């Protein structure tokens, strides 16, 4: 055929023309200039990044009439034959179809003979990892100590499949994927030479679809150029390649961040009617949220995201008002649901359900805040447990006086239902009699408090303290232990006994069964309180965990 595809027509012919593999071309150029070129070289990297191209340039550099030279002339007999693929001293071997041990043995026999008219006999073996184990073993000795006129250049996309015995005998050069901007710039140069008008946006779209491969990018460009007659529009490029416009991905993500379910359903319906691949769209959404998280983190953005500059700016703007924790949580969710879309017989419905669930995700609290709140919850429960398990309470009347109420005045006595000073009793009276008078005074205006004290007893009375033994249920103890009620009891006792500095001592006493029952009830209540706390529920949902046990310390 007379027509050459762009990938062959514009194949680089010198090291300087190779795109974005400077670390390889500079090493080889310096090695040739200093006469330190290795006899066995392995080029490893993704497809379409220039491995075979550089192998041919290296062969020309070694066999050029002016060579070995870092810059082949591309005009001598050797350069022309290598460029056209007809050089008798440069053998390009396909490792996939010449992988048997017999073919490697033939190579070993032929390598002994001197080259016909070039300086070196060069063997370029593409996809060398396809050789059989026996073939690799047959090549070992020759590869390690080839004749002085022989040189091996290997190329592979899967270096891990090559035995280490072969790798250790080669100088290895690793190729990199080509970024979108470099691919687009190279295609723009080709379009200018071919007098083809196409927008930069379309070239970036083609470059992005190429996935870092120059050969794939030029193949897609060839396809687009063949379709159109005249200027190429962006709509034509989208239609030919069959990819969705990046603007639609931004619209979907914006609707997700705004929690606009109606907008999402409308966009998906439009996409589905246009015939786009739902599974491919879902992969684009996953990649988009990954990029949003990267720009939100804000480190090495240009290195971690292989997108045009203007698109990165759009990502930064979209992620401005969203937390990194929420983006991470959303990315984790949609990545886990990828299998749901892949195996679904109704991918559109599955995608709608996944995005609706994603919208309803509650933003997660930062781990530091979550831990702080859990510690606070633990302390609150512990404090309540301590308050409910008090065995003995000592009350100082100076701490229990009601604000703005003068102690011992007639007004305060009336408020608390205290007896007048004429009703004061002598310390020589029986404790039961004194206690009964206290209960009678309390019951006049505080009958509910008197009911809680009905089973209590006055155990000890002296000049400085009054000790009460509280009996009954936990409810009774809690009612009596309230600060307000203790203040009432203390005021009445002080008035009856005519002692201003007397202290009230409360002892709690229960039967063994009641004590055990009360502790079990209290423990169960505290456990239930912990389990029903919203923070605990959010923690279980965020970490997808379960409660194994609840311990009250």
Image (cartoon, rainbow, N blue to C red):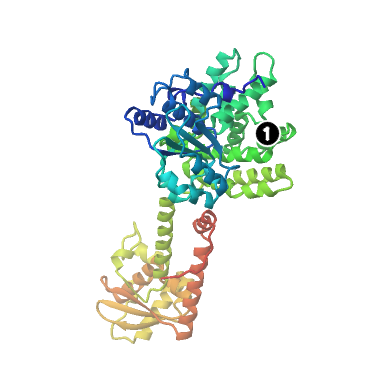
Residue 515 in picture, x, y percent from top left: 45, 81
Residue 528 in picture, x, y percent from top left: 52, 67
Quarter of the figure with the N terminus:
top right
Q: Is residue 139 above or below residue 153?
A: below
Residue 179 in picture, x, y percent from top left: 49, 30
Residue 514 in picture, x, y percent from top left: 48, 82
- Tell me: 536 left or right of 194: left
Q: Please count the marks in the image.
A: 1
Q: Is residue 260 above or below residue 523?
A: above
Can residue 306 be seen by looking at this rendering?
A: no
Element under disc 1: helix
Q: Is residue 400 above or below residue 227?
A: below
Front residue of 421 and 365: 365
Residue at the image point whose x is 58% and y is 18% from the top: 199
The quarter of the displayed image where residue 266 is located: top right
* Label 1: few (<14), some (14–19) or many (≥20) C-alpha neighbours in 10 Å: some
Tag 1 residue: 267
Front residue of 243 and 460: 243
The quarter of the displayed image where residue 409 is located: bottom left
Residue at the image point whose x is 57% and y is 41% from the top: 286
Front residue of 28 and 358: 28
The quarter of the displayed image where residue 219 is located: top right
Q: Is residue 406 above or below residue 345?
A: below
- Tell me: 233 left or right of 149: right
Quarter of the figure with the C terminus:
bottom left
Can residue 226 be seen by looking at this rendering?
A: yes
Front residue of 447 and 551: 551
């Amino acid at each position: 055929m007379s027509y050459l595809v762009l990938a062959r027509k514009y194949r680089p012919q010198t090291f300087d023309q190779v795109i974005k593999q400077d670390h390889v071309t500079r090493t080889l150029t310096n090695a040739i200039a200093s006469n330190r070129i290795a006899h066995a070289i392995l080029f490893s990297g993704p497809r379409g990044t220039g491995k075979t191209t550089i192998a041919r340039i290296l062969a020309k550099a070694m066999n050029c009439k002016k060579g070995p030279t870092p810059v082949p002339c591309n005009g001598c007999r050797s350069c022309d034959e290598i460029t056209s693929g007809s050089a008798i001293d440069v053998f390009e071997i396909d490792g996939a179809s010449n992988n048997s041990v017999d073919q490697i043995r033939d190579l070993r026999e032929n390598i002994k003979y001197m080259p016909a008219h070039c300086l070196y006999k060069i063997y370029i073996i593409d996809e060398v990892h396809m050789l059989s184990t026996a073939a690799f073993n047959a090549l070992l000795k020759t590869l390690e100590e080839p004749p002085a006129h022989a040189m091996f250049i290997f190329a592979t996309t899967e270096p891990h499949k090559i035995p280490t015995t072969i790798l250790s005998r080669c100088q290895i050069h690793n190729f990199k994927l080509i970024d979108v901007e470099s691919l687009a710039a190279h295609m723009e140069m080709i379009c200018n030479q071919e007098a083809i008008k196409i927008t930069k946006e379309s070239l970036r779209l083609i470059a992005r679809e190429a996935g870092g491969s120059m050969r794939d990018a030029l193949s897609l460009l060839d396809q687009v150029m063949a379709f159109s007659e005249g200027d190429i529009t962006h709509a034509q490029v989208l239609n030919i390649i069959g990819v969705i416009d990046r603007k639609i991905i931004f619209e979907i993500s914006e609707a997700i961040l705004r929690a606009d379910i109606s907008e999402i359903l409308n966009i998906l319906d439009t996409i589905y009617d246009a015939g786009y691949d739902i599974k491919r769209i879902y992969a684009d959404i996953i990649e988009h949220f990954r990029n949003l998280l990267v720009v939100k983190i804000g480190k090495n953005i240009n290195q971690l995201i292989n997108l045009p500059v203007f698109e990165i700016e759009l990502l930064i703007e979209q992620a401005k008002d969203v937390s990194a924790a929420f983006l991470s949580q959303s990315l984790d969710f949609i990545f886990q649901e990828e299998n749901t879309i892949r195996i679904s017989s109704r991918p559109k419905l599955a995608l709608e359900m996944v995005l609706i669930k994603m919208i309803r995700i509650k933003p997660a609290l930062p781990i530091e805040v979550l831990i702080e709140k859990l510690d606070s919850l633990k302390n609150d429960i512990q404090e309540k447990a301590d308050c409910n398990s008090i065995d003995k309470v000592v009350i100082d009347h100076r701490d229990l006086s009601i604000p703005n109420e003068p102690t011992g005045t007639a007004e305060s006595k009336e408020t608390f239902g205290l007896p007048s000073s004429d009703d004061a009793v002598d310390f020589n009276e029986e404790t039961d009699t004194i206690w009964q008078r206290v209960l009678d005074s309390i019951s006049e205006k505080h009958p509910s408090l008197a009911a809680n004290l009905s089973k209590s007893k006055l155990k000890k009375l002296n000049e400085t303290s009054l000790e009460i033994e509280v009996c009954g249920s936990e409810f009774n103890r809690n009612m009596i232990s309230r600060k307000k009620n203790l203040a009432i009891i203390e005021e009445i006792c002080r008035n009856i006994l005519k002692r201003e500095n007397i202290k009230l001592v409360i002892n709690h006493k229960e039967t063994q069964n009641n004590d055990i029952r009360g502790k079990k009830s209290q423990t169960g209540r505290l456990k239930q309180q912990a389990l029903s706390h919203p923070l605990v529920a959010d923690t279980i949902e965020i970490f997808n965990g379960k409660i194994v046990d609840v311990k009250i310390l």
